[in-house]
């Protein structure tokens, strides 16, 4: 097993139609992660899910493009993730944010473009 660096896996559960102050929440979160120089962010579109009291969303043929669940994953150091959490507490109004320990084996080089 490769020994790596201790990190944190951050998961943000939202819906693709969620907005914050008129902005698409998915885009806002990923852009802010980039602005804060987090290692990277990846968003996944779910095929079925629900949040809290919301109805179950599913990707049946007739509803393929409707408000599907989204999971955004970000892995970085504990300090960097902790610095990002206040932003998430402000903008994620109807979603779920979780963290768990991660072992970072390879971390991409910083790319300031």
Image (cartoon, helix red, strand yellow):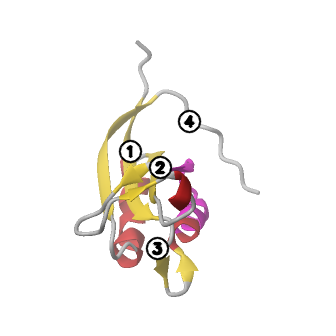
Q: Nearer the viewer, mark 3 or mark 1?
A: 3
Pair 4/1: label in front: 1
Element marked by disc 4? loop
| Location of mark 3 (residue) | 18
* Image quarter (top left, top right, bottom left or bottom right) of the C terminus: bottom right
Counting from the top left corner in percent of width and height, residue 9 is at 38, 44
In this rendering, is residue 21 above or below 16?
Answer: below
- Give the magenta-colored segment's residue range: 29-45
Q: Position of residue 94 (x, y in %)?
A: 33, 73
What is the secondary structure assignment of the residue under circle 3?
A: loop
In space, the residues marked 3 and 1 are separated at their CA atoms by 22 Å
Give the residue number, with chain letter if any, for mark 4: 107
Marks 4 & 2, CB-CB < 8 Å contact: no
**Disc ID at residue 9:** 1
Q: In this view of the protein, which residue sits in the foreground, 88 or 65?
A: 65
Mark nearer the viewer, 4 or 3: 3
How crowded pointer 4 is (Cα within 10 Å; few <14, some 14-19, many 20+) is rated as few
Label located before the other in sequence (4 or 1): 1
Image quarter hosting the N terminus: top left
Report if the CB atoms under discs 1 and 2 are less than 8 Å apart.
yes
As rendered, which of 94 and 78 lies closer to the eye?
Answer: 94
Cα distance between the residues tagged 4 and 3: 30 Å
Q: Earlier in the sequence, mark 4 or mark 2?
A: 2
């Amino acid at each position: 097993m490769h020994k790596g660096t201790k990190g944190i896996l951050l998961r943000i559960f939202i819906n693709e139609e969620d907005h914050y102050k008129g902005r698409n929440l998915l885009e806002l979160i990923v852009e802010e992660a980039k602005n804060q120089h987090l290692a990277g962010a990846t968003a996944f579109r779910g095929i079925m899910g629900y949040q809290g009291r919301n109805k179950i969303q599913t990707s049946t043929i007739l509803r393929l493009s409707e408000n599907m669940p989204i999971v955004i994953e970000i892995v970085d150091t504990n300090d960097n993730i902790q610095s990002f959490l206040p932003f998430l507490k402000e903008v994620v109004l109807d979603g779920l944010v979780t963290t768990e320990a991660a072992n970072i084996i390879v971390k991409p080089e910083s790319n300031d473009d």
